[in-house]
Image (tube, rainbow, N blue to C red):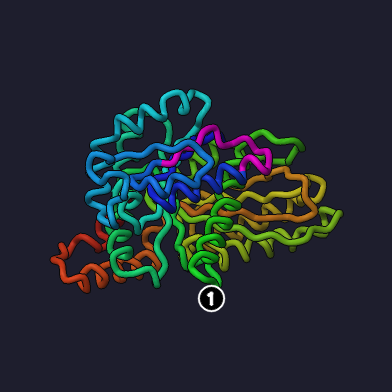
Amino acid sequence: MKVVLIGVGQAGGKVTQSLAQFDYDMGFDAVRGALAVNTARADLQNLDIDTALIGQDRVKGHGVGGDNELGAQIMQENATEVLNELDGRITTEAEAIVVVAGLGGGTGSGGAPMLARELKRIYEKPVYVLGILPGRDEGGLYQANAGRSLKTAAREADSLLLVDNDAWRGSGDSVAAGFERVNDAISQRVGLLFASGEAVEGVGESVVDSSEIINTLRGGGIASIGYASAEASEDASENVNTITSVTRKALLTSMSLPNAVKADSALLVVAGDPERLSRKGVERARRWVEDQTGSMEVRGGDFPLGSDKVASLIVLSGVERSERVDEFMERATEAANSQGGTTDPDEFTSDELDGLF
């Protein structure tokens, strides 16, 4: 699945670079372009991908200081400039556009939904937002920003692939180590998702293509992604239980939005050496995902990959009704109220998310 990545804000730029690097290191060639957009000059200086500094007339390259309303205004005012930077990058070859952002900071949380809306207005390709929720320890401003941005991004994008920062951070991680762990986890999972829709060496029995990824996410709303792997036997018949086991682990313990299992649709990709992949194991795992998610729309297939391991990658679409989302929106409401501002009673409820489906 050939994609163009646009990172908005500090976290968005770093994750975009990490995704592009993973794709390059693995030789997948799924990422066809990568651009980082920010209002803070310093956040762009250490990136190796192409960059665009916006809002210089408003903030002089110093960022928006967590003000996501200002971040949205600047993106709206500079949308033409960003689209010009993308000119020539988003070709007919690209099958989707992915806007990447941390939903807690000002530029990312305000700018990403606005950019997604502009991209959808111009292009007929799917526009997805890969959004990262702030951790519980990142402060009230970030929680409140993310609560507003989550709802707006889910409305504006064709699908919001959501990552809960707390899901993949170790309990003993420093802030820097925690962010690095999350970036690596995102790169591996999302990078493999893009690559699974690409033509690769090796012949699987039922290879996933990009249309299955697009159709899984077609319903919109919030999506989640999980991954797990294990050593595989050289004999495919001995890997039936291994495939089922890693699929259970991916869904129950490794999703980017934990404890959100019920879904409208799902995609199961089983990756590994074609000689080690068991068709019986893949089909058994797919039926198990159907039972767990309550969805009758579960696509499944192989991703041929030279490896002595077998891995399961799961995408769930339509998980906005989950307790995890409700918990976060409650936290965002409390954070907004604790800042002493006036809060629209409907601003952080799930009604708008419920209306998506």
Which quadrant of the figure contains the N terminus?
top right
Which is nearer the eye, 250 or 55? 55
**Furthest residue toward left:** 342
Identified at 51% across, 64% down, the residue is 176
The magenta stretch spans residue 16: no
Query: Residue 326's quadrant in the figure?
Result: bottom left
Rendering coords of residue 217 (x, y %): 46, 45
The magenta stretch spans residue 34: yes
- The residue wearing badge 1 is 171
In this rendering, is residue 171 above or below 227?
Answer: below
Which is nearer the eye, 318 or 9? 9
Can residue 306 be seen here? The reply is yes
Rendering coords of residue 317 (x, y %): 45, 52
Q: Secondary structure at mark 1?
A: loop
Rendering coords of residue 76 (x, y %): 25, 38
Category of crowding for the residue at label 1, using alpha-carbon neighbours closer than 10 angstroms: few (below 14), some (14–19), many (at least 20): few
Q: Which residues are magenta?
A: 23-36
Rendering coords of residue 262 (x, y %): 46, 61
Identified at 53% across, 75% down, the residue is 171
Position of 131 with respect to 272 (left or right) is left
Position of 72 with respect to 102 (left or right) is left
Going by the numbered disc 1, the residue's amino acid type is Ser
Which is nearer the eye, 124 or 27? 27
Identified at 64% across, 60% down, the residue is 228
Can residue 291 be seen here? The reply is no
**Furthest residue toward right:** 235
